[in-house]
Amino acid sequence: MYYCPGLCGKTTNLQFIYKKTNPEQKGKLISLATETERTLFFDFLPLALGDIRGFRVRFHLYTVPGQVFYAASRKLILKGVDGVIFVADSQIERMEANIESLDDLKINLAEQGYALEKLPYAIQYNKRDLPGVAPLDEMNKLLNTDGSQWYEGIATTGTGVFETLKGVAKHVLLELKKHY
Amino acid sequence: MAGSDLVMYENEFKKIDEELQKLHQQANATVVFLVDKNGQLIASAGDTQNIDTTSLASLTAGNIAATGGIARLLGEKEFSILFHEGEKDNIHISLIGQRVILVVIFDHRSSIGLVRLRIKKASEILTKIFEDISNKAEKEKVEGKTTESPFAEISDEDIDNLFK
């Protein structure tokens, strides 16, 4: 599950993953979006990662709509989540939106009976190529007080996109193994 | 993750598959699917070759989730049945138990009345099967008699190799 405020790069992450994944490993990228290409309900991309000891491993990647007034939809899509990637917009003027979105994530997870600190989770600090981005240690102070795994990203070019996904996916599988 | 897992063994899957095959025949449906509320396809019957079943499963679950949200706003617990009529194909979506979604796609060779009639019977049987699955898991948990983990042999290295 990719989560963040509007226009932070969730859909861009998924679009890059779709573009760069072999056809036999991916399904269709479904985007339920408005006419102006803002995510309306969710984006969905199924990925087949291969087999482990006879088990076929498939991931379903979802994004939530980031705009504030789609709050109700975000709650619904979070149900059944196994891992979360929070995509933060590194631009200084978006820091408040990042913080609000992170709080929103924690509240919505809590309503479903999840705690963010117990889920496989990583932060991607996206848009690192833009001017006026906050330094990474400042972003970590504001958005990552728990010391979770984080990655630098430029989703439009793909920098950090697969690294972030692999990090969380691995964590999801390790948790699954622990749980069973 | 913990609260929403569905673990099913082969004999249970066989019973589900048999029921879907029967429903597919008796309802004269094109395709019948069973989908987890989280969007995972559990089983299907009929000609699924030309259908993107993964996307259908995810969108169906999204549909149920969205209409569930509307239901709660209206003071309803949920809308347990959805029906969409198309020019050629129609789709009937219903909730089984609290967990599973039954999707029946049919065309002019069947009718909504026949489909609903057959679904009613199939729903009772499928609900019982899923209740049994859930009770079995709960019982094993309580008695501490969990079978050996199916993932026991998977090493951290196996997981690492997936991402090479």
Image (cartoon, rainbow, N blue to C red):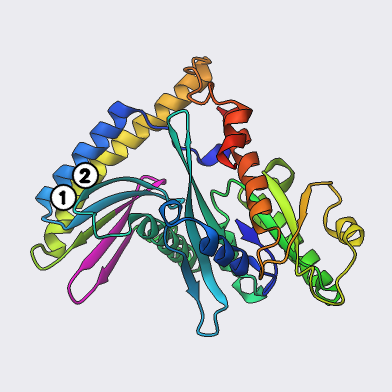
The quarter of the rendered structure image containing the C terminus of chain A is: top right
Q: Position of residue A20 (x, y in %)?
A: 54, 60
**Residue A113 in view (yes/no):** no
The answer to whether A164 is drawn above or below residue B82 in the figure is above
Decide if residue A64 is on the left or right side of residue B99: right
Q: The N terminus of chain A lies in which quarter of the figure? A: bottom right
The boundaries of the magenta stretch are B81-102
Other residues around mark 1 within 10 Å, as few (<14) / some (14–19) / many (≥20): many
Q: Residue B60 lies in magenta, yes or no?
A: no
Residue at image mark 1: B24
Residue B100 belongs to the span the image colors magenta:
yes
Return the residue found at the far left: B109
- B140 horizontally vs A111: left or right: left
Q: Which residue is mark 2?
A: B20
- Chain letter behind tag 2: B
Residue A5 rendering spot, x and y as whole percentages: 70, 70
In this rendering, position of residue A174 left or right of residue B37: right
Look at the numbered discs 1 and 2 and tell me whether their residues touch, using CB distance below 8 Å: yes
| Protein chain holding label 1 | B
Name the residue type under label 2. Answer: Leu
User: Which numbered disc covers residue B82?
Assistant: none
